[in-house]
Amino acid sequence: MKLLRVGTAGAERPALLDAEGVLRDLSGVVSDIDGVLLADDAALGRIRSAAEAGELPALDAAGLRVGPPLARIGKVVCIGLNYHDHATETGAEPPAEPVIFFKAADTVVGPYDTVLVPRGSEKTDWEVELAVVIGRTARYLGSHEEALAHVAGYAVAHDVSERAFQIERGGTWDKGKNCETFNPLGPWFVTADEVPDPQQLSLKLWVNGELKQDGNTSDQIFPVAEVVRYVSQFMTLYPGDIINTGTPAGVAMGHPEPKPFLRAGDVVELEIEGLGRQRQEFKDA
């Protein structure tokens, strides 16, 4: 299933994109798409049954904003330097263990919402990433099979970063990762049954129409199953938590000088195979 949330910011309602590409209203079946829903097999079953029976009314998508596909996200866990080619382009050694950092849940915005270039920014950068959505409470998972059984599905994430804040200002990476609007998510949450192999997904990103990133999740240093298993050794993952699993080569930081960091007026488009496409215009904060 492709689940999404539509409407004005803060007042989104749940919806489903059916196999014919028709937007369907879910508000008569469930109240929202969040961790409570993902942990409730019966509620997900009701959605499937209603969709298969043709009981969901169509929505007019014209002019309708698409919000983040998940509400009330608990935490956004991020994995750094998780593609061999990205580690190479930044001059970093491939890490021996996954590099973990966090984004606040309030950085998450819709897939077509405006992204703000922070005040004082000189090095705002792009990163297309596969987001893993947790569907069951995960603690100390013991195997890759167990880890994947705790995954509810997947979505496109844009891990926008300010490299000077992240790398040159001291401390942790958090200052360059948590600026307002720095994690567009969606357009859909795609349930895991529609993604038989998360290690065979192409990822692409364009800036002003020019292809910048063209990778595949097969190049991940730590695959999705290992990332989920590993993270669960250090923290409890709850339904509705998200893990951004890293980005392939092609970020601005990896370009030769002068590096083409983002400015107000730039347009970024990104997509992951089967998970949809995003588009954001960048404006000054």
Image (spheres, rainbow, N blue to C red):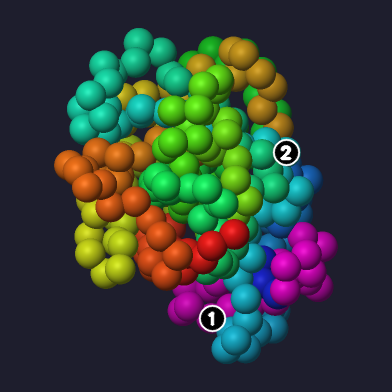
- Per the model, the C-alpha gap separating discs 2 and 1 is 30 Å
Q: Is residue 58 magenta?
A: no
Number of marks in picture: 2
Of 101 and 252, nearer the camera is: 252
> In the rendering, which numbered label is found on residue 79?
none
Q: Earlier in the sequence, mark 2 or mark 1?
A: 1
| Amino acid carrying mark 1 in the image | Val
**Compared to 65, does 78 lie above or below?**
above
Measuring from the top left, give residue 36's x and y in whole percent.
Answer: 78, 46
**Compared to 11, does 252 lie above or below?**
above
Is residue 30 in view from this perspective?
no
**Residue pictured at 60% horizontal, 86% vertical:** 63
Label 1, on which residue?
22
- The magenta region covers 8-32
Of 85 and 165, nearer the camera is: 165
Report which quarter residue 104 is drawn in: top right
**Compared to 239, does 20 lie above or below?**
below
Measuring from the top left, give residue 211's x and y in whole percent.
Answer: 22, 60
Secondary element under disc 2, as helix, strand or loop, is loop
Which label sits in the foreground, 2 or 1?
2
Label 2 neighbour load within 10 Å: few <14, some 14-19, many 20+: some
Label 2, on which residue?
74
